[in-house]
Image: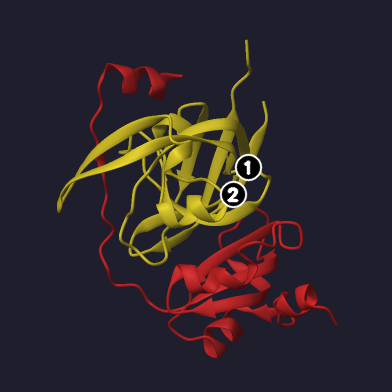
Amino acid sequence: MNAAEQLVPIATEPLSWAEICAQYPDQFVCLVDIAKVELRSPEIKTASVVGHGPTHDTAFEPIRGLDMRYPRFAIRFTGACSEPLIRPSLVIDDETLQLLRS
Amino acid sequence: MTRLSSSFVHDRELILVEAEVVGPTGRTTEVRLVLDTGAAATTLTPRVIEKIGYTRRHGFKRAKVHTAIGEEHGYWVRVAELTVLGVATPNFALTVFPLGHKDIDGLVGMNFLRHFNFEVRPGDRQIVVELLARG
């Protein structure tokens, strides 16, 4: 095994979302090979975990430079999130209005 | 008339939908967005947009928002493609701002939703999209 191969992260076997939450509680997980409950659903049926950690960045770090091997991924939080959503109100000038209408 | 149906999830009474965002090299991330008809612009968070290869340098215009905690500056960027509710839009312009939430990656606003008819069916947890004939 060469150095490059050693750096490739190991993906878990496909796990259900409940299993992912149980194995990686209250943290961010980086997922690949994602199967959805149904087409275009936000709910995950199964996925393989390739990274995890306390932040979005740490979960992604194992596949950061591996675009070819992992061209498609998702990062999710496995815990409950109680922070309020900061909902922005966009300041709209004439140029922005043109952009919104394009 | 093409009609597409997509399911959504409720999270504290917000409607969360699945989306795909494609970066400049083709790398794609699946994200969860709040369906927000009160938002003029679609927004993604910096942490999401940066992981598919965009940085502030890709921004083509500064953006300013007011939030409950004050004024913030972000930027506009054109992503290679955004797909929401089964509708793929290439070269789509959106704003980039932090939203301060661990499990929400952005908002899908009216600059995306205005291009088709849609019907939210809360009882069925479905959103039905009706594509408009072009030209």
Which quarter of the figure is the N terminus of chain A placed in? bottom right
Chain letter for the red part: A
- Residue at label 2? B6
Residue B25 % position (x, y)? 67, 44
Label 1 CA crowd tier, 10 Å (few <14, some 14–19, many 20+): some
Is residue B125 at least partly visible in the picture? no
What amino acid does circle 1 point to?
A: Gly
Tell which circle, 1 or 2, labels the residue nearer the N-terminal end.
2
- Residue at label 1? B86
Element class at badge 2? strand
* Residue in the image at 65% along x and 75% along y: A50
Check the image and report above or below for B113 versus A48. Answer: above
Quarter of the image for residue A63 reads bottom right
* Residue in the image at 69% along x and 62% along y: A66
What amino acid does circle 2 point to?
A: Ser
Check the image and report above or below for B110 versus B24. Answer: above
Q: Residue furthest bottom?
A: A23
* Residue in the image at 56% along x and 60% along y: A42
Badge 1 vs badge 2, beta-carbon distance below 8 Å: yes
Residue A5 % position (x, y)? 79, 76
Identify the subunit bearing mark 2: B
Chain letter for the yellow part: B
Element class at badge 1? loop
Q: Residue furthest right?
A: A1
| Label at residue A32 | none
Check the image and report above or below for A35 versus B91. Answer: below
Label 2 CA crowd tier, 10 Å (few <14, some 14–19, many 20+): many
Quarter of the image for residue A11 reads bottom right
The reply, left or right, for residue B74 in relation to residue A89 is right
